[in-house]
Image (cartoon, rainbow, N blue to C red):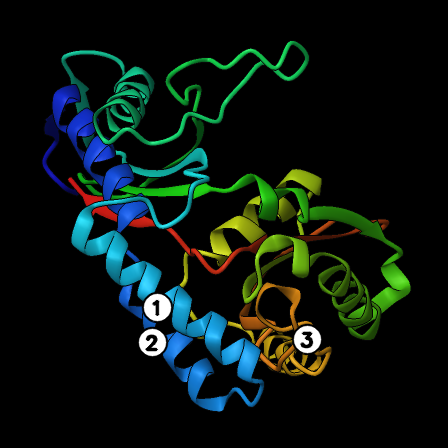
């Protein structure tokens, strides 16, 4: 049993503001290592040149506090809220939204959120997409993920026949990555969510993108095997960085799974462009 902690809304707002600015301008170390490793293994001269440019772009963005990509994304926030936390001084959701608003205003990040029909921009990149879960403890963990539109458009969910099995899942995912990787600014990170309800699968696939690049699933050998075999299959497709050829189409495949209905087999796939942007803080 933890003592109840009070966490002011202003701290939540400031954390979200700081995280979105950092996520948009600083390539994480695991991404830089994955790109360097791919550069060492790559045999295509064009692909090597593109990977070099990605590394140079990341260096310039960090030194000059500029966005890694012109698409500074839809604002996605994952929040794990300890059950022994008392948020004071306002409303948690509004505090997160204010942090998004301040980040995109203060860092001059492109606002990309609009009304789906009129296409009128909301002007401050809100509303965000907020996933909240209650967990044990008296802390709040915040993870922000700016998600670009190009890679989002190449993602999806399918309801396979339960009889599809592992081979059916592997072939389905390989087909979807083959169709979408070039338009998702390869090399991509592939997040896979299997099972649950339809929306569960999508969230599992999104959460899989938060794992350090190349870190295998820690709980299921079947998923680790799928991650290995699917990554190998993807990287012999020849799509390569930016779709211009080469062996580096994906940096990693991360898969997560949950139990599902006996009549269903949801399979979601999230293609994340090479700008794998996310940052986290614990309050």
CA separation in Å, label 3 and label 2: 20 Å
**Residue designated by label 1:** 55
Residue at the (40%, 67%) spot, across then down: 53
* 153 lies left or right of 87: right
Marking on residue 234: 3
Q: Are marks 3 and 2 in contact (CB under 8 Å)?
A: no
The one of 159 and 279 positioned closer to us in this rendering: 279
Percent across and percent down for residue 185 are 57, 57
* 4 lies left or right of 22: left
The one of 255 and 117 positioned closer to us in this rendering: 117
Percent across and percent down for residue 132 are 40, 33
Percent across and percent down for residue 19 are 24, 41
Percent across and percent down for residue 131 are 44, 34
Where residue 152 sits, quadrant-wise, is top right
Which corner quadrant holds the C terminus? top left
Q: Earlier in the sequence, mark 3 or mark 2?
A: 2
**Residue designated by label 2:** 33
SS at mark 2?
helix
Q: Earlier in the sequence, mark 1 or mark 3?
A: 1
SS at mark 3?
helix
The one of 12 and 153 positioned closer to us in this rendering: 153
């Amino acid at each position: 049993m933890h003592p109840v902690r009070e966490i002011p809304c202003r701290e939540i707002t400031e954390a979200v503001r700081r995280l979105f600015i950092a996520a948009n301008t600083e390539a994480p170390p695991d991404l830089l290592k994955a790109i360097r490793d791919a550069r060492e293994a790559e045999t295509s001269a064009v692909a090597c040149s593109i990977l070099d440019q990605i590394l140079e772009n990341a260096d310039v963005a960090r030194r000059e506090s500029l966005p890694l990509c012109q698409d500074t994304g839809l604002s996605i926030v994952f929040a794990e809220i300890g059950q022994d936390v008392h948020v004071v001084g306002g409303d948690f959701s509004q505090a997160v939204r204010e942090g998004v608003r301040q980040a995109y205003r203060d860092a001059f990040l492109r606002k990309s959120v609009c009304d789906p029909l009129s296409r009128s921009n909301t002007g401050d990149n809100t509303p965000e997409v907020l996933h909240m879960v209650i967990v044990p403890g008296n802390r709040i963990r915040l993870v922000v993920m700016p998600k670009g539109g190009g890679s989002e458009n190449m993602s999806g969910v399918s309801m396979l026949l339960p009889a599809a099995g592992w081979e059916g899942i592997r072939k389905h995912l390989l087909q979807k990555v083959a169709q979408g990787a070039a338009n998702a600014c390869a090399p991509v990170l592939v997040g896979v969510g299997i099972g649950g309800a339809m929306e569960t699968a999508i969230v599992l696939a999104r959460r899989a993108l938060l794992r350090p690049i190349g870190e295998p699933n820690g709980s299921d050998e079947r998923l680790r095997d799928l991650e290995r075999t699917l990554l190998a299959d993807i990287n012999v497709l020849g799509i390569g960085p930016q779709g211009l050829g080469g062996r580096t189409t994906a940096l990693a495949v991360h898969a997560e799974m949950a139990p599902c209905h006996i009549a269903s087999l949801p399979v979601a796939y999230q293609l994340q462009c090479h700008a794998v942007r996310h940052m986290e803080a614990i309050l």
